[in-house]
Image (cartoon, rainbow, N blue to C red):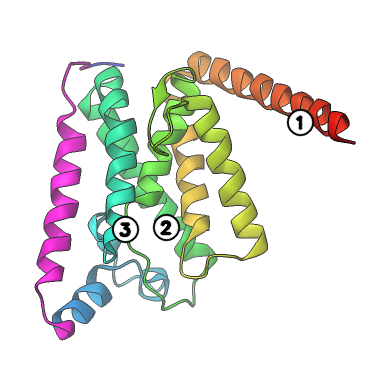
């Protein structure tokens, strides 16, 4: 891990970029918005057919819904400002962008005929959450507003996203992209520092086991 510092420059640039795109779309005509989303949103069919690749990067910075924008940027700032200072802006930026690009690419490959656009930084954000989960499991973050250790945050999000994907709930939300982002971020963590990531994974397994044991104990008390 190199180029560590006391700044979160990349995180701030991404947040500024996402807000800028949102404001441009907010004051634009509907015809421009539709054209913009069709051109820069992540639409699997044209990507799989090989004639439109730049949305794999561009879609990360597009948000149409204010709640979606605020929740993503809050999570990005909560996790990114801490993680970027630890990893350095270059390493952090590479992981963020790779998580967004590869999670989008996996979505396209597994849904090749879809013409439904996917937008937002969620896949990329889940990637950096995965790194926090493995590298800094006991670091407190407010990504879900309530202060939680990174390991607990990761376990909660993995559980919620997996259940949502299996139950096919929350139509209109690409839960698969979130999970692919988490997987990509995890692979990046193991590539960057295998031993550190392995320790984080072991800690997560222990925490999960403790939660399971406590759950059984509390359930028996209520019976």
Q: Residue at x 41, y 22 (%)?
A: 140
3 or 1: tag closer to the N-terminus: 3
Q: Which quadrant of the rendered structure holds the N terminus?
A: top left
Residue farthest toward the right in the current orientation of the protein:
223
Q: Position of residue 205 (x, y in %)?
A: 66, 24
Earlier residue among tags 1 and 2: 2
Q: Is residue 95 magenta?
A: no
User: Where the C terminus falls, by quadrant?
Assistant: top right
Residue 131, placed above or below residue 115: above
Residues marked 3 and 1 touching at CB (< 8 Å) = no
Q: Residue at x 52, y 48 (%)?
A: 179
Rendered image: mark on residue 67: 3
Q: Position of residue 222 (x, y in %)?
A: 85, 34
Q: What residue is disc 1 on?
A: 215
Kindly give the residue lying farthest to the front in the view shown: 222
* Gap in angstroms between the C-alphas marked 3 and 1: 33 Å
Q: Quadrant of residue 96?
A: top left
Residue nearer the viewer, 89 or 140: 140
Residue 144 shown left or right of residue 156 in the figure: left
x, y percentage for residue 141? 39, 27
What is the span of residues highlighted in magenta in the rendered image? Answer: 3-31
Residue at image point 58% right, 34% down: 155
- Relative to 55, is 9 on the left or the right? left
**Which residue, given by chain and number where applicable, does mark 2 sit on?**
105
> Which badge, 2 or 3, comes first in the chain's sequence?
3
Neighbor class of circle 2 (other Cα within 10 Å; few <14, some 14-19, many 20+) is many
Question: Dot 2: what SS?
Answer: helix
Which element carries disc 1, helix, strand or loop? helix
- Between the residue at mark 1 and the residue at mark 2, the CA separation in whole angstroms equals 37 Å
> Which dot, 2 or 3, sits closer to the camera?
3
């Amino acid at each position: 891990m190199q180029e560590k510092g006391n700044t979160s420059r990349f995180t701030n640039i991404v947040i500024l970029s996402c807000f800028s795109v949102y404001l441009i779309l907010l004051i634009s005509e509907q015809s421009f918005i539709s054209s913009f989303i069709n051109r820069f949103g992540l639409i699997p069919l044209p990507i799989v057919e090989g004639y439109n690749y730049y949305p794999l990067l561009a879609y990360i910075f597009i948000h149409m819904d204010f709640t979606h924008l605020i929740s993503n940027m809050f999570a990005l700032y909560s996790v990114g400002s801490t993680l970027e200072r630890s990893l350095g802006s270059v390493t952090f930026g590479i992981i963020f962008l790779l998580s967004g690009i590869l999670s989008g690419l996996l979505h396209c490959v597994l849904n090749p005929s879809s013409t439904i656009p996917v937008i937002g930084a969620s896949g990329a954000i889940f990637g950096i959450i995965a790194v926090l989960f493995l590298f800094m499991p006991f670091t407190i973050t407010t990504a879900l507003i309530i202060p939680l250790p990174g390991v607990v945050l990761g376990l909660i999000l993995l559980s919620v996203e997996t259940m949502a994907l299996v139950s096919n709930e929350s139509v209109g939300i690409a839960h698969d992209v979130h999970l692919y982002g988490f997987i990509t971020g995890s692979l990046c963590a193991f590539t960057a520092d295998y031993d550190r990531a392995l320790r984080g994974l072991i800690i997560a397994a222990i925490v999960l086991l403790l939660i399971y044991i406590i759950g059984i104990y509390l359930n028996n008390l209520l019976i």
